[in-house]
Amino acid sequence: MTRLRDLPIRDDLRGQEAYGAPQLDVPVQLNTNENPYPPSPRLVRALADAVGGIAGTLNRYPDRDAVELRKDLADYLGHGLTARQIWAANGSNEIIQQIVQAFGGPGRRALGFEPSYSMHPIITRVANTAWINAQRDDDFGVDPDRAIAVIKEYQPDIVFLTSPNNPTGTALPLPSLEAILQVAPGMVVVDEAYGEFRRTGTPSALSLLPVHPRLIVTRTMSKAFAMAGTRVGYLAADPAVIDALLLVRLPYHLSAVTQVVARTAIAHQEELLSAVDTLREERDRLVSWLRSEDLMVAESDANFVLFGTFEDRHAVWQRVLDRGVLIRETGPPGWLRVSVGTPGEMASFRTALKESL
Ligand SMILES: *Cc1c(COP(=O)(O)O)cnc(C)c1O
């Protein structure tokens, strides 16, 4: 039997652990921030028809530049964006990987404000790029003066900002972002995976694109768009940024099946996004309920809530799981994260948590 450590693997990967949100088969899954509502039978039929429509051409490579899909995504985002300013890949994780491949690399560094999305440092390090862990404030925000100081000190080639942030739910005010853009010497990536769940009045970084050619805003169809299984993420940026990504992407990276399924989903956006308002209301109810149980709760502009704090969070996580509800053991020590599900799933969660405290 060959073990991993017997292989001539890269020195910097030795002893590393693979990304692993547990995929457990339990009745209520509230651990990966998916939209809990599956496609309707009507949309399932439309998706099957769309795949059927291109199946006869699968002997050919797909459109390498996914032009039609990028046009649809530009229309969806609005803000006057065109296909030239959009790029798409297999999940926003691949988008982030391409960004680091193009703008990071040996001798370069990326900086993020933690706690935040764990894949930013993982993708960065795998691309042989140094990771600088700047800390968020006690309320999980990013104080602009502190951010400016740390960026001036480390001169990162890439700055990652997640807004709304995962796992805390915190959105970043535009003035803070603008202050960071003024001093950042390299690319600034705003990961808006949860952008659609923002509370009313919370702006998107998309509005800053026309004046900031080194700003990249990433989005995904995995969360609000209810298409996590399709694996489509995308970004909006200056067309020159997309020219840079063309240098590192694999040819034909986005399959013809993926492209046609994503386009069909966008054509049915009204149905797919119809649950967003319901989920936002359910989130606000969840925040109030957790507070009424005397728990600490982080303000959330996303479809999940970070709550705590617990002396032994693993024990609480396990007791909730024993009651058939899977949540996420993540974030700063003592905190747990729960995704917003259907009203029935949230009722199960409330019961399970109450019995576990
Ligand atoms: C879920 C998530 C992503 C990745 O989503 P994909 O499924 O790869 O598109 C990216 N960023 C953040 C902050 C996320 O939470």
Image: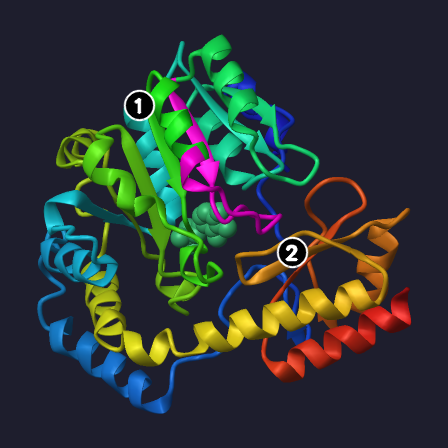
Q: Is residue 142 left or right of residue 235?
A: right
Q: Quadrant of the N terminus?
A: top right
The magenta stretch spans which residues?
A: 157-175
Which colour style is shown? rainbow
| Residue 171 part of the magenta-drawn span | yes
Residue 286 is drawn in which quadrant?
bottom right
Report which residue position mark 1 lands on.
103
Q: Quadrant of the C terminus?
A: bottom right
- Look at the numbered disc 2 and give the secondary structure of its residue: loop
Report which residue position mark 2 lands on.
22
The residue sitting at 14% across, 31% down in the picture is 240
Residue 222 is drawn in which quadrant?
bottom left
Q: Which kind of residue does numbered mark 1 sit on?
A: Phe
Whether residue 334 is visible:
yes
Disc 1 packing (10 Å; few <14; some 14–19; many ≥20): some
Front residue of this view, candidates 304 and 204: 204
Whether residue 104 is visible:
no
